[in-house]
Image (cartoon, grey):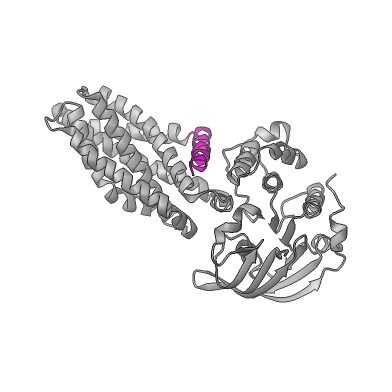
Amino acid sequence: MWRDALLVAGKDLRVEARSRVATNQVAPYALVILLLFGFAFDSNRPLLTQAAPGLFWVAVLLCSLLAVQRSFAIEAADGARDGLRLSGLDPAGIFLGKAAAVAAVLVGLEVLLGAGVVVLYGTGLHDPLLLVATAVLATAGLGAAGTVYGIMAAGLRVRETLLPLLILPVVAPVLLAATEAWRAALGLSADNGWRWLTLLGSFAAIYVTLGVLGFGTLLEEA
Amino acid sequence: MVHPAIRFRGAVALVGRFPVLAGVDLDVAQGEIVLLQGPNGAGKSSLLRACAGLLPVVHGCAEVLGADLVADPRSVRRRVGLLGHSSALYDDLSVRENVRFAVRASGGSRDGVDDALATLGLTGRLAGTPVGGLSAGQRRRVALAVLVARNAELWLLDEPHAGLDAEHRDLLDRLVRSAVGKGATVVLASHERDRAHALAGRVVEVSGGVVNAVTPAPGGLARGERGRANVA
C-alpha cells in the first residue's frame, strides 16, 4: 500500500510540476482572494488583522477545491482512470497517494498565503509550533476529505459544480478549528488554541480511515 | 489442469440498467488469437472490458486466466493488458515516464521499459516528449509500448490498428504473434477484416450483447504456426 501511495503521489506531483497549473493558476488565484479581502476590509485595519486567520483558511479551502478538481481531472482525461484500475494498484495506496499529492500542493499554497497574510494584513506570530501543527492537521484533513469527495464526483458530468457543494459544508469543522487555533497562534485570542487540534486530528483520522477502507468501492463506481 | 484463458457462460453485464452483455457464452484457449466481429454497439468493447475486469459481470459465470471475475473483478487486472479506444496516458508526462509508471504500477520490472520503447520506435527525443504533444498514431504506439512492457498474459485489443500507419500496423501484427509465441492469449475487436482475419484463428460474431457464431478465421494461421513469427 505504501509503495503504491508513493508511486501515485510521485506521478501526481510530477504532472503538477509539468503542467504548472498550481503555480500559474491556483497560486495567483489564492493571492487574488487575499487581495480582495484586503480591499474589502482595508478601511478597518484592526478588523482585517482580527479576521486574518479566517480569511486565510477560507482562501485555503477555495484553493483546495481547485487542487482536488485538478487531481481527478488528470485521471478523467484519455481514460487514465481505467489505466489506474487496470494496473491493480492497491486502492488504499491510490487514495493515500492522491491525498498526499493534494496536501503537498496545499502546503505550498499555505506558505505563499501565509506570507501574503503577514505582508498584506500585518499579523504577528505568537506560537509558531501551534501554527505549524494546525496547518499540518488541517491540510491532512482537507487532502483526505477532498480525495474522498473528489472520487465520488469524478464520474459525474456535473462534477465541477457538484464538488464545492459536497466539500465545503463537510470541511466547515476544519475552517472553524483551524481559524480558532490560528487566532491563538497569532496572538489574536487568549484561548488555548491547542484544544482545537483534537477536532482537526479527529477529522483527518476519520477521512483517512474512510478513504483507505472505501476508496476501492468509490473508484469502481466512478 | 490448464485453465482456458477465458470462459464465459451466460455472462450478463450492465451499464446503468442496460444489459451491454446479455448472456455471453465464450471459450478462448490459452495461446489463441480470437477476433471479435460485429456491428457498432454489438458489445465487442464491453466484452473486452468485462474480460479485463473493468466491467462487472453481474450474472452468469466469467473466468479469466483462472480468476472468477464475478466474485472479484480486480483479481485478474494485473495480468491483463487492454488497448482501448482511449490510450490511458497522462498528457503532461513524457513517453518514457508514462510507460515506466504503467509498468511500475502493475508490479512489473523497469528493465523492459527501454526495450518496449525501442520496439515501438519511441527512442531518442521522442521518449522525452510529453504525450500531449504527440500525434494520435504516436499516442497509440505509446499505449502499445505499455502493453509490451507490462508483459501481460492476456492482450485485449479494441481496434488496435486504428490511427497507425502501414509500417506500424505490420509491427503491431508482429507484436501480437510474438506475444502469442511467448504464451500470451489475444482477443481483438477490429473492423479491419483482412488484417484481423490473417492474425486470428477464430472469429466470434457478437451482436446485441451475445455471441451469435464462432467460426474459423478465413486465412488465419493455425495455432502452432503463430508463435514462430517473431518481431523483426
Q: Is residue B198 above or below residue A18?
A: below
Q: Nearer the viewer, residue A165 or B186?
A: B186
Q: What residue do we see at 70% from left, 31% from top?
A: B125
Residue range in magenta is A1-20
Q: Is residue B50 above or below residue A36?
A: below
Residue B123 within the magenta-colored segment of the rendering: no
Hey, which residue is sitting farthest front in the picture?
B1
- A101 sits left or right of B156 in the view: left
Q: What residue do we see at 86% from left, 60% from top?
A: B224
- B2 sits left or right of A86 in the view: right
Q: Nearer the viewer, residue A143 or A60?
A: A143
- A107 sits left or right of B94 in the view: left
Q: Nearer the viewer, residue B184 or A75?
A: B184
How far across and how far down the image is residue A187, in percent?
A: 16, 26
Q: In this figure, what is the number of numbered marks? A: 0
Q: What residue do we see at 85% from left, 44% from top?
A: B232
Give the main secondary structure, helix, strand or loop, of the magenta stretch: helix
How far across and how far down the image is residue A59, in percent?
A: 30, 37
Residue B177, image quadrant: bottom right
Residue A13 within the magenta-colored segment of the rendering: yes
Q: Is residue A42 visible?
A: no
